[in-house]
Amino acid sequence: MSDKHVHDENCNHDHDHDHEHEELTLTLTDEDGNDVEMVLVETFDVGDKLYALLLERGNPEADGYIMRLEEEEDGMVLANIEDEAEWKAVEKAYEELVSNSEEG
């Protein structure tokens, strides 16, 4: 019997080691027309919508952005959150997410 084990989507057990994940980067254009390279750090659900936390690549001091992810024919696209009630719900959910990760 072989001791080799292939780790893939059919692997049905907990792992005690990390797999390297490729970071997802994308380019956004800021309000001044400058291209800014962003990294997708986290996604989270609020109700039936999906949101993404984006941070500027290579600039840990920069503010992050939270944007709504919407599915279109060509795939997922980012959308600004323009509704104040939606923003407050997303902000609250994100704060809870951060609080829970700090406790754990």
Image (tube, rainbow, N blue to C red):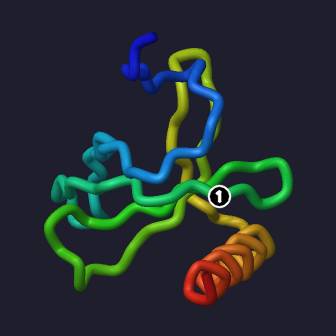
Q: Residue at x 17, y 74 (%)?
A: 59
Q: Secondary structure at mark 1?
A: strand
Residue on which disc 1 sits: 44
Image-quadrant location for residue 31: bottom left
Q: In screen coordinates, is 20 left or right of 5?
A: left
Q: Nearer the viewer, residue 67 or 42?
A: 42
Image coordinates for residue 96, horizontal then vertical, percent? 70, 82
Image coordinates for residue 51, horizontal then vertical, percent? 62, 55
Q: Residue at x 44, y 26 (%)?
A: 7
The N terminus: image quadrant: top left
Q: Nearer the viewer, residue 74 or 17?
A: 17
Image coordinates for residue 16, horizontal then vertical, percent? 47, 53
Q: In screen coordinates, is 55 left or right of 73?
A: left
Residue lying farthest right?
A: 47
The C terminus: image quadrant: bottom right
Q: Is residue 29 above or below residue 11?
A: below
At label 1, counting other C-alpha atoms closer than 10 Å, the crowd grade (few under 14, some 14-19, many 20 or more) is: some
Q: In screen coordinates, is 51 left or right of 75?
A: right
Residue lying farthest front?
A: 1
Q: Nearer the viewer, residue 71 or 4?
A: 4
Q: Is residue 93 above or below residue 50?
A: below
Q: Is residue 39 above or below residue 9?
A: below
Q: Residue at x 39, y 22 (%)?
A: 3
Q: Nearer the viewer, residue 37 or 58?
A: 58
Which amino acid does the dot numbered 1 rest on?
Answer: Phe
Q: How many marks?
A: 1
Image coordinates for residue 83, horizontal then vertical, percent? 72, 67
Image-quadrant location for residue 88: bottom right
Q: Residue at x 72, y 56 (%)?
A: 45
